[in-house]
Every structure is written in structure tokens, then in C-alpha cells.
Image (tube, rainbow, N blue to C red):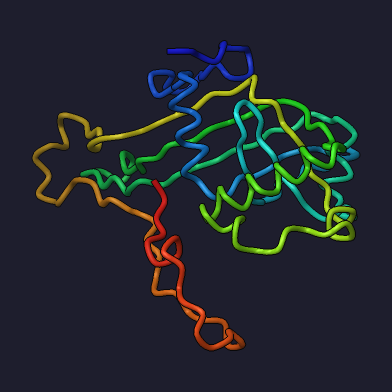
Amino acid sequence: MEQFAKTPKTTLKRLPQRGEFDREAVYKILDEALVCHVGFVVDGQPFVIPTSYGRVGDTLYIHGSAASRMMRSLSGKIPVCITVTLLDGLVLARSAFHHSVNYRSVVVFGQAELVEDELEKMSALAALTEHIVPGRWAEVRSPNAQELKATTVLAVPLEEVSAKVRTGDPKDDDEDMAIPVWAGQLPLTLTPGSPINDSLLAPGIELPDYVRNYQRS
């Protein structure tokens, strides 16, 4: 399996056995999650902004208003750190100290590149939409020229990347195993609720299958 090369930034210092550098495993996490957090520094002030994203091959795309501070700042090719986290469950131990969570996370380091080619920009926006709701892009109106101009799209090459994963039971100390309290895992999943029609939806428009059967996997 192809691996991401370890670098000083991506080498795990804490619990290195949880590190994952397999490219396919990393991309699986990115493709399941919905939100990333974008970290950057402007004039000595750190910012961490949540946003949606999409992946095409070895590139992560983010987008936003052309007037936003994040997009304007990152267009200047400053260092960026992007994180993604999937929470898979609560881990309840016999001691307060050993409580934990099961999770899958990815950290990306690099520099964002401004997407100026109109075809790539449109493809990136399609990828963003399809990442959130597969099947949606083909049914909706594409962005027009004015909307494209008002939107900045940035590409972050997936080169300096690592994942970290925790699974399994609590790690209680031997001397705590006899404590008479329940211990174990409480799995958590993202479960969609029942779709709600737009109050202005025209009569006769059916709920599409990709909404009716929506799930993250």
C-alpha cells in the first residue's frame, strides 16, 4: 500500500502506535467526514475556521466568499494546517483518568493554491457538492459567472499528511479492574433525520433517492 512519507510535522510524538500513514486509509477518513477545521496565522493571530471541503485525487479543495479573511489570507500561500475528525464512540473506563473516545482523525500541512482556471474551479465546486450530497450536482443549477467571481476556491496538495486512530476498549490499570462499575464502549454514528420539504417546494416534486437513503460511510 502506498504510504505518506513521515516528516517532522507528521511524526506522532504522543501514542505513535495510533498513527496511520496509508494513503487509502487517510482518504477514507477524508471522504467520510463532512467538516474540516482550517488553521492559519495572520499578523501573529491564530485562526481556526470550520468549513466544508471536497477531495479530488491528491488535492483537497476548500471554498468561500472572495471577501473572506480566510480565503484572502490563504491565497497568499501562507502555511496552513487542516484537520478532520470522526467521532466513533465514547470509551468509559473504571477510572476517570482512563476515559477516552474512539476516533479517526487526519492532519494536513501545506500551502493553499488559488484556483484560477474556470474549469478546475467548477470541477472543485462539483466535488465539494458531491462530497456532501452525492448525486446533487447533476440536478441543481450550476454557479453562474457572477457567483463564480464571488467565490474563491483553494487547492491544498495532500503531501504532508497523517492520520491518528483509536479503537477498542478502555485501557484500565490492573488495580482498577475489580471496581464494580460498568466499563465499555458507547458507539456514536451520524444518523440523518427525516427530510423536511422546503415550505415553498412546488407540488409534485418527489424526494430524491440520494436524500431518502442518505448516509455517510
* Residue 75 placement (x, y as % from top left): 87, 37
Identify the residue shown where x is 18% and y is 47%. 183
- Extreme front residue here? 204
Can you tell which quarter of the image residue 53 is in?
top right
User: Is residue 179 left or right of 1 when viewed as pictured?
Assistant: left
* Residue 96 placement (x, y as % from top left): 31, 46
Quadrant location of the C terminus in the rendered image: top left
In depth, the one of 50 and 144 nearer the eye is: 144
User: Is residue 1 left or right of 197 when viewed as pictured?
Assistant: left
Identify the residue shown where x is 9% and y is 49%. 180
In depth, the one of 196 and 87 nearer the eye is: 196
In depth, the one of 174 and 39 nearer the eye is: 39
Identify the residue shown where x is 84% and y is 42%. 118
Q: Is residue 180 above or below residue 41?
A: below
Q: Is residue 80 above or below residue 11?
A: below
* Residue 18 placement (x, y as % from top left): 40, 24
Can you tell which quarter of the image residue 176 is in?
top left
In depth, the one of 70 and 202 nearer the eye is: 202
Q: Is residue 187 above or below residue 79?
A: below
